[in-house]
Every structure is written in structure tokens, then in C-alpha cells.
Amino acid sequence: MAGQKTVVAGALGECVHVAGVVHFLRLAEAAGWRTVFLGPAVPLEAFIAAARREQADLVGVSYRLTPETGERLLGEFAEEADELKTRGVRFAFGGTPPVAERARAMGFFERVFDGSESPAEVLAYLKGVPADGGAEADYPQTLLERIAWRKPYPVIRHHFGLPSVEETIDGIQHIAEARVLDVISLGTDQDAQAHFFHPERQTKRTRGAGGVPVRSAEDFRALYAASRRGNYPLMRTYSGTDDFIRLAELYVETIHNAWCAIPLFWFNQMDGRGVWDLEGSIREHQKLMAWYGERGIPVELNEPHHWGMRDAPDVVFVASAFISAYNARAFGVRDYVAQMMFNSPPGLSDAMDLAKMLACLRMIERLERPEFCIWRQTRTGLLSYPVNTRAARAHLAASVYLQMALEPHIVHVVGYTEAQHAATAEEVVESCELAMRAIENALRGAPDMTADPLVQARAEELVEEAEWTLAAIRLLPTKEGEDAWLDPAALAEAVRRGILDAPQLLANRYAQGKIATAVDGRGACVAVDPETGTPLSEVQRLASLGFDESSLRAAIEGGVFHG
């Protein structure tokens, strides 16, 4: 490839340990380098000759034996390679900490690796980030650029917000300097989300409840400024629950909001998070999608897991994932972040959880077009963490490993302290390191868990079931020419009628809350007869709501999902 740089690497002298060299070269290939592996126990003269012959831009030297012998051998190597270095060839060393310490003291090598570095850190070096960590210009500052730059690793995101602005600023500085996180999801308190422009509605009693009490544009700017160090992470925050466009303008201007997360049916009077009624909030959320879409800023609809966390059956989770993507595309979003929260509800088996996410992807991939790109984001369930922190660490790692079966572009790490308290900066760093180890293990060659016949069968079953659900919504009355999947009145009616429903919505004035669910023997969350506990197919459940099977079938066969 024209313009492609070449790296030559091997183990020097009598050293035969090449696992680290091979890993280094794999990362180099991922970073776009042409690689030449020289193998184990390469004589000094052969090493130099290969560097000349291959016209190497970078030479990687490894030695993992005794420090004294290594120091002597590396000194001889540096003397012989000095002429190459004066011509612009770069040199890097990798070895055990004692040998690396002596190599570092020589001052010959541009970068010395002692095995403590993460693969992501090595990859950053191979992609041109200077040894001192670099400046903001060395790190992509938009989501899509960061995704491309981080390959083959996913972008890492974590939520962070402490009860004071000052604490949060200090924590952001610490997180950025640790260089383990690509996106800081700024967690603001409820007053900041609902009453930012209405100080008269704010209360001192709830200040800092659930996040950082941001009260001014200057607060946002100070929080963003704290991130301008380390690996210069992107920043994003909630869409808020009122004054949506005003908040969007503020976020883009102060923290350069990397992407917006918007609900469709939530953050309103139905869940007690906002001032809008259900239909009105749907309409406002659609306007917000259009606002971000016009500016080319990615949009995530953090919708399906809200149903899952309220014990809705898997089919409602999947149907809401489709409705979310359908609305995003219709309102001009080009880059759609599909969020898939695992473990929602917590009792699902891993196999059925993975099947549910596959079903979500199969549904929304029907909508993909050149002008509508889907970016996969996975996360661990908020309600699934055990209180015991050792068990919680294991749960985090296991969940992330499972998520990697979907080849996510973004992994939203949920701190292992979730069941106890909001994560401190150091706990954010630790959680990200735990997740990265699981990601690294998976990328080395995980089995294809999606190939399990039980997973595939359940995914197909959910796709078929969700089509019934969506057909029922399409049959709701609308104004002439309106699309029920986009019409706020029809979508609100779908909740009121119980087409979209969850047990925890009982006694809610906007919803039925009459659906009963259970986790079956497979580990899937299904609707059941509330009196007998017998599982209900989606056709049976919808029939109990007054929907005729023949009408639903006619809607599906008539091309309701085409176009």
C-alpha cells in the first residue's frame, strides 16, 4: 500500500520469547502498519540488516532474559543502529520491567514498554500519540472519528458525576489523566435536568441528588476544561426533561456534546422525571432528534432498557428498539447509536439476553441506509449488580465479555459499585480497566456465542413476536396520512392500550400496568396469564387487548415493514 509505514520486530540475541513481539505486531497491523516479524533469537547483525532491507520506519526490539546481559546487548545494538536512527528510523523496546528499566536509562529508544501498558496504550503509540501523552490534536474529538481511531477496540464510555462541581472537576482530571476512558458521560442531578432554566423550581434539599449539581454554563465549561488532559476524553450528558432545545444549545456550546441520548416514552410525568405529559414529551423528543440531526450530531435513543428495567417482556423491549430507530431515522438522524443494556430485567440468562439483543439488531438493521448508519453500544444492566463488590467486579467482567459477541462500537462501562454508591474517579478507572481486560480477552478469539442454536432460535422468535406488536401499533387510529409509528398521539395510545406495557407501570395514569411477566425455564422474560402463570404468545396477549389476529396478520403480510 502506497505510503504505508513498515515496522520490523523480533527478539534480540539469545532471547526466544516472542509472544510480546507477536502481540505488538498484531496491534501495529490494526493501526495500519506493514509488519515484518523476524522471530526469536535474532543476531544483532541480522536485526540491523533486516531493518535496512525492509526500509523500516520503526524497529521493535524485545529482550526478556537477565538485565545485565540485556543491557550489554542493547548497548551494542544501539551503537550499530545509531546510523539508522540518524536517518529517521524510530526504535522501541519491550521486555521485563528490570530490562526495560535499563533500556530506558540508555536514552536510545523512543518508547520502552515493560508489560504494564494496556494494549490500548500501545495502540495509541502506534497511531502516533507521543510518549508524553500528546496534545488534544493527537486524540479524535468526535464520536465517529474516535470509533475509527480506537479500532479494533471499542470506544469506552462511563457515567460520572459527584455531589459537588468541585469534586467532579477533580475526578474528571483524574479520569482523563488515567487514559482509560474515551467518553465521560456527565451525570447531572435531577434539578439540572428538569429545572436548569428555572431556579425557582430548584430545591436545596435535592441538590446533588443523583449527580453533579450544575447550575450555570460556567459550571459546564469548567467540567469540560477539566477533561483537557490525559487522553482528552469526549464529553456528553443527558438530554434533560424540559427546555430540550435550550439545553441542547448549551451542551453543544459548553461541553461539545459528543452525542445526545433521548428517550421516547420516558422522562416525563409517566415516570416522574419531567413536567411533560406522555404525548407532549414524545413530540418534544422528536423535535430534539431533528435538532441534533440537522447538525450532524449522533443520537442515541435510550429507550428499550427503560421497559426492561420495569420487567416488560422481551418482545416489548425489542419492539421499542425498532420504534426508537424508526423515529430517529424519520427525524433526520444520520448516525444512530443503538443502546443495548444487558441484564434488564436482571434474571435473564446470558443466552436469552444475547438472543434479545440479536433480535433488536435484526429489527433495526432493516432501517439501515447510506444516510442512516447504526453504531452498536452495549452496557451492563443498572439493576443487575450484586452489593458484594468482589462479586460485582466479576459480574462486570463477565457481562462485558458477553457483550463483545455483538462486536460493539461503544462499550458503556457501568461501574461495579452501582448497587452501593456512585462511582468515585478511582472506581471509574478500575471499572474501565476490568472491562478492558474482558474486551482484550474477547478480541484474542472468543467463541461465537451468537451461533448457539438456542440463541438463534430465540432471536428469530422475538423478531416474529415483535412484528405482531408493531403491527398492533400500526392499526391504531391516526389523522389521515399519519404514520402511527411516528404519531405522538398513536404512540401514547399504544401505551394507554397496553400494547407497550410493563408490570411496574401498575396504577400509572398513562399506562395499563396490567401485564404479567415471568422468567421462563430458558431464562427469557415472557408475558404470562396473570391467573395461571401460563406463557402467552404475543398474538394471545394482543387478543386480550382487543386485536384480531387476522387484522394483525394482514398488516404484516401487506408490507407494514417494507420501505
Image: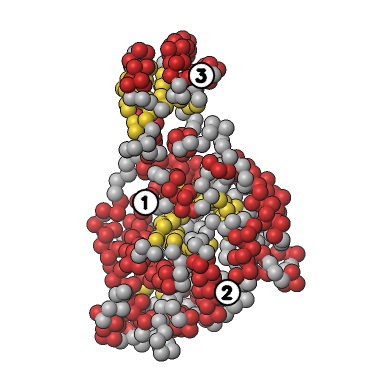
- In the image, 187: left or right of 60? right
Residue hosting label 2: 268
Residue drawn 37% across the image and 60% down it: 357
Q: Visible in this render: residue 206? A: yes
The spot of residue 426 in percent (x, y) is 60, 43
- The disc placed on residue 489 is none
- In the image, 548: left or right of 260? left
Residue hosting label 1: 407
Among the two numbered marks 1 and 2 on one chain, the one whose residue lies closer to the N terminus: 2
Amino acid type indicated by mark 2: Asn
Please state which of the two labelled residues, at mark 1 or mark 2, is closer to the viewer: 1
- In the image, 327: left or right of 562? right
Among the two numbered marks 3 and 1 on one chain, the one whose residue lies closer to the N terminus: 3
Residue 110 vs residue 431, the one in the foreground:
110
Residue 89 vs residue 175, the one in the foreground:
89
Q: Visible in this render: residue 60? A: no
Q: Is residue 166 above or below residue 178?
A: below
* Spatial separation of the CA atoms under disc 3 and disc 2: 61 Å
Quadrant showing the C terminus: bottom left
Q: Secondary structure at mark 2?
A: loop
Q: Secondary structure at mark 1?
A: loop
* Spatial separation of the CA atoms under disc 3 and disc 1: 39 Å
Residue hosting label 3: 108
Q: Is residue 439 above or below residue 39?
A: below
Q: Residues within 10 Å of mark 2 (few under 14, many from 20)?
A: many
Among the two numbered marks 3 and 2 on one chain, the one whose residue lies closer to the N terminus: 3
Amino acid type indicated by mark 1: Glu
Residue drawn 45% across the image and 50% down it: 147
